[in-house]
Structure formats: C-alpha cells, structure tokens
Amino acid sequence: MDLHVIYTRSDRILLSRRRYESWRQIQDEIADYVTSLGPWSPEDTVAYLGYEHLGLDPSAAEQVATLLASTDPIIELKFGLSA
C-alpha cells in the first residue's frame, strides 16, 4: 500500500492511503491543499516523517501503523506539545 503526505495551508499534515492519479486530484479533495509527497511505501513514509518531523507524538511508525490498521483513508498527524 502506498501513502501520501499532504501539507495544508492550515498547517495540518495529513497522511492518506487513497490512490490518486495526480496531485490535482488531491488538491480537488483537500480544500486547503498546498503540496503533497508520495506515493511512498509505509517504510519510506516512516523514514521521511521521522527525519523531517521530529515532534511527532506518537512516533511516525505508530501513526503510519494506525492508518494502516484503520478503516479511515486519511488521518491528521499528531505532534507532542512543546516544553
């Protein structure tokens, strides 16, 4: 299963397992779409998120696993509170 990382104007980062023909299809679906990356394997997605977004809480691996185990096609990534 391939995943997309989707960035929005409202500073949300979404993770999607939907199959998209192009970024334009994602833009049509996500109202405040800015850009997206992928499609990537779950392993590549975890590696990218773990490197680029150190504040993820739960970890990138846990959030990807949650999406893969869920019936939801898209989740919003969660970040820990800054100290």
Image (tube, rainbow, N blue to C red):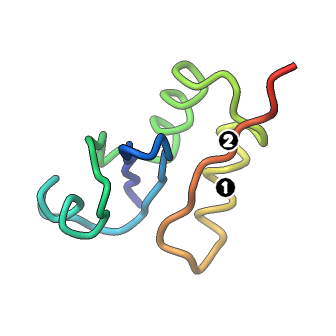
Spot occupied by residue 51 in the image (x, y as percentages of width and height): 56, 19
| Disc sitting over residue 77 in the figure | none
Query: 81 or 21: which is nearer to us?
Result: 81
In the picture, the disc for residue 65 is 1
Residue 47 position in % (x across, y down): 53, 28
On screen, residue 24 above or below 19: above
In the shown orientation, is residue 53 left or right of residue 81?
left
What amino acid is at disc 1? Ala
Element type at mark 2: helix
Q: Quadrant of the N terminus?
A: bottom left
Query: Which residue is painted at 23% across and 61% down in the image?
Result: 26
**Judging from the image, what secondary structure is the residue with disc 1 in?**
helix
> Which quadrant, please, contains the C terminus?
top right
Toward the front, the furthest residue is 10
Are the two marked residues, 2 and 1, in contact with CB atoms closer than 8 angstroms?
yes
Would you identify the image quadrant in which residue 40 lies? top left
Residue found 60% across the figure and 62% down from its top: 67
Q: Nearer the viewer, residue 78 or 69?
A: 78
Task: Say left or right for 82 vs 47.
Answer: right
For marks 2 and 1, give the CA distance: 6 Å
> Which of the numbered marks, if any, corresponds to residue 61?
2
